[in-house]
Image (cartoon, rainbow, N blue to C red):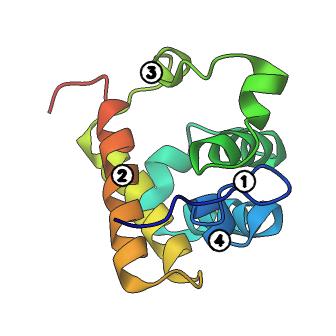
């Protein structure tokens, strides 16, 4: 039986993805890299078109969401309330291709982190599940 994990002084589990990514700075970097890929990859043009020209508000919202989602401070919940991801994305036509494009951008951003291959793969799978959940268009 393993020893229980003791939270860090900041209240963040040192084994959380938030901590493994480098805390606040790591989650911010992951988010910014995600949007660089979304802004430049031809296969992400459809999802890029769903965003405003100025990506700063989108970067901030995803960063806040990922902070809590990855085991850090629940910034999105504190600042904006419950994420209600599916509801908030209903105005956008999220089909299989859009979900795959989002996942591809996140996979590329994750590839630029210091996560172990196993942890990266597990996180990629979780993000793929979330992206699939967001779909609101038939195949």
The residue lying at 50 percent from left, 24 percent from top is 89
Report, in whole angstroms, how far the alpha carbon at label 2 lies from the one at label 4: 15 Å
- Mark 1 Cα shell of 10 Å, populated few (<14), some (14-19), many (≥20): some
Is 97 located above or below residue 43 in the figure?
above
Give the secondary structure at mark 3.
helix
Disc on the earlier residue, 3 or 2: 3
- Which residue occupies 41% across, 62% down? 123
Mark 2 lies on a secondary structure that is helix
- Percent x, y for residue 21? 65, 71
At horizontal 42% and vertical 73% (from top left) the residue drawn is: 120
Mark 3 Cα shell of 10 Å, populated few (<14), some (14-19), many (≥20) = some
- Asked if 66 appears above or below 43 in the picture, the reply is above
Q: Which mark is residue 106?
A: none
Query: What distance separates the C-alpha of mark 3 from that of mark 2?
Result: 16 Å
Q: N-terminal of the two: label 2 or label 4?
A: 4
Residue 35: percent from the left, percent from the top? 65, 60
- Label 3 – label 1 distance at C-alpha: 27 Å
Element assignment for label 1: loop
Q: Quadrant of residue 50?
A: top right
Mark 3 or 2: the one toward you: 2
**To which residue does mark 2 refer?**
126
Occupied quadrant, residue 83: top right
Question: Which of the 4 image quadrants contains residue 33?
Answer: bottom right
Closest to the observer, 49 or 105? 105
Q: Which mark is residue 12?
A: 1
Label 4 environment density (alpha carbons within 10 Å; few <14, some 14–19, many ≥20):
many
Seen at 14% across and 33% down, the residue is 139
Q: Which residue is mark 4?
A: 21
Q: CA distance from mark 2 to mark 1?
A: 20 Å
Q: Which residue is mark 3?
A: 86
Residue 36 visible to an observer of this rendering: no
């Amino acid at each position: 039986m393993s020893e229980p994990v003791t939270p860090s002084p900041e209240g963040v589990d040192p084994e959380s993805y938030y901590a493994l990514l480098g805390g606040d700075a790591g989650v911010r970097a992951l988010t910014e890299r995600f949007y660089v890929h979304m802004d430049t990859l031809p296969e992400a043009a459809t999802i890029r078109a769903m965003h405003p020209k100025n990506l700063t508000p989108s970067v901030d919202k995803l960063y806040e969401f990922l902070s809590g989602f990855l085991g850090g401070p629940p910034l999105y919940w504190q600042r904006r309330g419950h994420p209600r991801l599916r509801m908030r994305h209903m105005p956008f036509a999220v089909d299989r291709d859009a979900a795959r494009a989002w996942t591809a951008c996140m996979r590329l951003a994750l590839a630029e982190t210091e996560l172990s291959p196993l942890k990266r793969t597990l996180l990629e799978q979780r993000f793929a599940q979330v992206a699939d959940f967001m779909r609101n268009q038939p195949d």
